Amino acid sequence: MKENQCESNCSIHESTNAYTDDSSSNACGCECGCENTNNNDNCHCCSTDPVNAAKSLLESSFFAALKEVHVEKLKKLIEKEWGSTIDKGVELTFRVMEKQWQSSISKSVANKEFYSELEKIFASGKPTSK
């Protein structure tokens, strides 16, 4: 779906965009590309006909809902067919990332100690002993 490309002379969007927080979408809900800005009446989303605007909104909503259903169905099938394999991969990833995280923490502590000691050396002009 294309984002709305209506120019500022689109009467429906001018009058209603002020009431919406999302400036990336148009107020009538349609998604179209209105390249012909000289005659907005030919553009279904820039028409002043509220029935046409509602039709466009419903058509757009239908396809958005259809996509959501497809995604949910695919997620269920993927979980059913590949779930145990995905679980094993996730568990392996978690174990490896946990080790890397702990290693990073240890390295960070060592680096902080190094910088702290180095700071003391430069501040006093001589090394400190532990």
Image (cartoon, grey):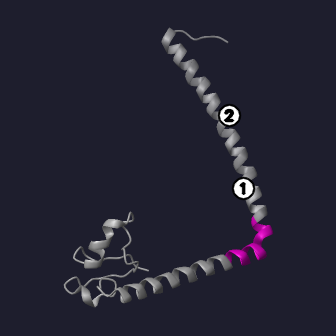
Q: Relative to the observer, which residue lies in front, 92 or 57?
A: 57
Q: CA distance from mark 1 to mark 2?
A: 20 Å
Height in image: 30 above or below 95? Answer: below
Any mark on residue 128, and which?
Answer: none
Callout 2: SS? helix
Any mark on residue 93, and which?
Answer: 1
Q: How many numbered marks have been drawn onto this rendered protein structure? A: 2
Callout 1: SS? helix
Instruction: Tell me the crowding category of disc 2: few under 14, some 14 to 19, or many 20 or more residues within 10 angstroms, Cα based.
Output: few
Please state the horizontal and vertical placement of residue 93, each as a whole percent of the image.
72, 56
15 lies left or right of 62? left
Image quadrant in which you'd find residue 116: top right
Mark 2 residue type: Ser
Instruction: Tell me the crowding category of disc 1: few under 14, some 14 to 19, or many 20 or more residues within 10 angstroms, Cα based.
Output: few
Height in image: 114 above or below 89? Answer: above
Q: In the image, is residue 75 part of the stretch drawn in magenta?
A: yes
Main secondary-structure element of the magenta-colored stretch: helix
Please state the horizontal and vertical placement of residue 14, each as a whole percent of the image.
27, 73
* Furthest-left residue in this view: 38
Please state the horizontal and vertical placement of residue 117, each as a whole percent of the image.
58, 18
* Magenta region, residue range: 74-86
Q: The N terminus lies in which quarter of the figure? A: bottom left
- Confirm or deny contact between disc 1 and disc 2 (CB under 8 A): no
Give the residue displayed 68% in from the left and 79% down from the top: 73
Disc 2 target residue: 106
Q: Relative to the observer, which residue lies in front, 44 or 33?
A: 44
Give the residue displayed 33% in from the left and 81% down from the top: 33
Of callouts 1 and 2, which one flags the residue occurring earlier in the amino acid sequence?
Answer: 1
Mark 1 residue type: Thr
Give the residue displayed 27% in from the left and 73% down from the top: 15
